[in-house]
């Protein structure tokens, strides 16, 4: 609306400023500004002076840790290297050897000076929000530096009329075998190993065990 004041006597006796003030209030009322101000003030009061302007996403999902490479189950080395990754980018990692306390680490991670025997390596990822993998990745392996002992269980007599021979053999631990006759190149073999059509004369049979860690019998 527009509020104005009519003064008797025509234009010659204009009132001082009230019409201007009235016109200002009339303009505010007609445009709805007073209502907008009142609504804004009500909203601000309801929200409170300490109401946050915005909020970020909350990350409560822990990452998953993956061991990408680790030593074989049996190894004849006193050093081991591990490579690992996380399902979430920008994750940090904690590592532990043989159930020791976790310590920060990065991939690849190398451990040296390992003693002979079984070992356990554990690694967990920690994402940018601080969530740690509750089920860390693990690798178990055994360091074996001791070669096996090969034993001939049975063989032909030193002197024989037979042109065939059979040899039975075993090892002091789980192992594979390589056999050779008369200086030939060793070849994979199983016990018993049999040979036939042997020529008259001297013959030499050799067998060597190699354990699961790759250590060959040195005798």
Image (cartoon, rainbow, N blue to C red):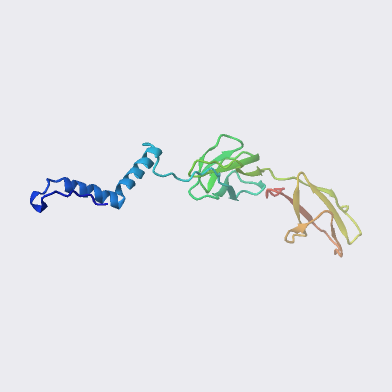
Residue 63 image point, x, y percent? 55, 46
Q: Nearer the viewer, residue 48 or 195?
A: 48
The residue lying furthest to the left in this view is: 12
**What is the total number of numbered labels drawn onto the structure image?**
0
Horizontally, is 8 left or right of 66 in the view? left
Residue 121 image point, x, y percent? 60, 42
Residue 43 image point, x, y percent? 38, 42
The residue lying furthest to the front in this view is: 9
Residue 9 image point, x, y percent? 10, 50
The residue lying furthest to the right in this view is: 161
The image quadrant of residue 163 is: bottom right
Q: Residue sitting at 9 percent across and 49 percent down?
A: 13
Horizontally, is 194 left or right of 188 in the view? right
Horizontally, is 155 left or right of 136 in the view? right
The residue lying furthest to the top in this view is: 101
Q: Nearer the viewer, residue 100 or 210?
A: 100
Q: Residue sitting at 19 percent across and 46 percent down?
A: 21
Q: Residue sitting at 80 percent across and 55 percent down?
A: 190
Q: Nearer the viewer, residue 178 or 134?
A: 134
Horizontally, is 205 left or right of 100 in the view? right
């Amino acid at each position: 609306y527009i509020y104005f004041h009519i003064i008797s006597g025509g234009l010659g006796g204009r009132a001082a400023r009230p019409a201007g003030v009235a016109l200002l209030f009339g303009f505010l009322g007609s445009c709805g500004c007073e209502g907008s101000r009142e609504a804004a003030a009500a909203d601000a009061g309801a929200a409170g002076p300490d109401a946050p302007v915005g909020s970020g996403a909350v990350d409560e999902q822990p990452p998953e840790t993956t061991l990408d490479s680790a030593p074989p189950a049996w190894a004849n080395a006193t050093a081991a290297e591990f490579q690992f990754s996380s399902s979430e980018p920008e994750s940090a990692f904690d590592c532990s050897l043989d159930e020791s306390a976790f310590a920060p680490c990065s991939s690849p991670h190398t451990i040296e000076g390992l003693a002979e025997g079984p070992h356990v390596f554990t690694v967990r990822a920690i994402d940018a929000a601080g969530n740690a993998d509750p089920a860390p990745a693990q690798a178990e392996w055994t360091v074996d530096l001791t070669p096996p002992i090969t034993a001939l269980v049975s063989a032909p007599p030193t002197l024989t009329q037979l042109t065939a021979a059979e040899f039975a053999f075993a090892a002091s631990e789980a192992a594979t075998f390589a056999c050779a006759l008369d200086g030939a190149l060793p070849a994979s073999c199983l016990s018993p190993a049999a040979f036939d059509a042997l020529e008259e004369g001297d013959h030499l049979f050799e067998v060597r065990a190699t354990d699961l860690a790759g250590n060959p019998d040195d005798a």
